[in-house]
């Protein structure tokens, strides 16, 4: 996958298994979800989520509230939320990788 070829996640199921599927009459690229078969166009307008809402979401995540619950109370879309969480966890370094197996004789 090349860097310039970023694909939006599926608006139905949030899957990132997306293929390009031609373009619309006004030259917008169309995509198709390999998971559920949904065809869609990349969202035309970006919905900006306020930093307040993001901070609230972070809190809810810490409280182990389900994504469904968070989406419901904060009124963000499940798809956006899923992506937000994915990005967030990708950015978080895996601390488990730190080796603690060094043998000290
Ligand atoms: Zn899908």
Image: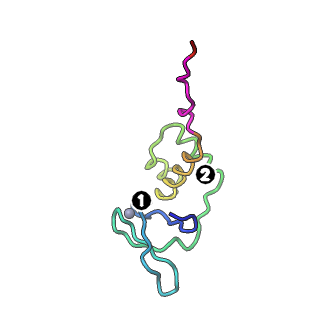
**Circle 1 Cα neighbour tier, 10 Å, few/some/many (<14 / 14–19 / ≥20):** some
Can you say whether 97 is above or below 100 in the image? below
Task: Identify the residue at horizontal 59%, vertical 67% (top origin).
Answer: 46
What residue range appears in magenta?
94-103
Task: Identify the residue at horizontal 64%, vertical 56% (top origin).
Answer: 50
Q: Is label 2's Cβ within 8 Å of ligand 1?
A: no
- The earlier-in-sequence mark between 1 and 2 is 1
Residue identifier under label 2: 53
50 or 89, which lies in front? 89
Residue 98 inside the magenta-drawn segment? yes
Task: Identify the residue at horizontal 55%, vertical 74% (top origin).
Answer: 44
Q: How far is mark 1 from mark 2, CA to CA? A: 24 Å
Residue 99: which quarter of the image? top right
Can you say whether 98 is above or below 67 in the image? above
Image quadrant, ligand 1: bottom left
Asked whether the beta carbons under mark 1 and mark 2 sit within 8 Å of each other, the answer is no
Residue identifier under label 1: 15
Residue 104: which quarter of the image? top right
79 or 60, which lies in front? 79
Residue 83 percent coordinates (x, y): 51, 55
Residue 22: which quarter of the image? bottom left
> Element under label 2?
helix
């Amino acid at each position: 996958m090349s860097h310039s070829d970023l694909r939006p996640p599926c608006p139905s199921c949030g899957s990132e298994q997306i293929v390009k599927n031609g373009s619309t009459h006004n030259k917008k690229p169309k995509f198709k979800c390999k998971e559920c078969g949904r065809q869609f166009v990349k969202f035309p307008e970006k919905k900006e989520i306020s930093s307040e809402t993001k901070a609230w979401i972070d809190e809810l995540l810490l409280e182990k509230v389900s994504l469904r619950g968070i989406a419901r109370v904060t009124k963000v879309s499940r798809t956006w939320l899923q992506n937000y969480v994915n990005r967030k966890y990708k950015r978080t370094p895996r601390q488990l990788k730190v080796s603690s197996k060094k043998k000290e004789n």
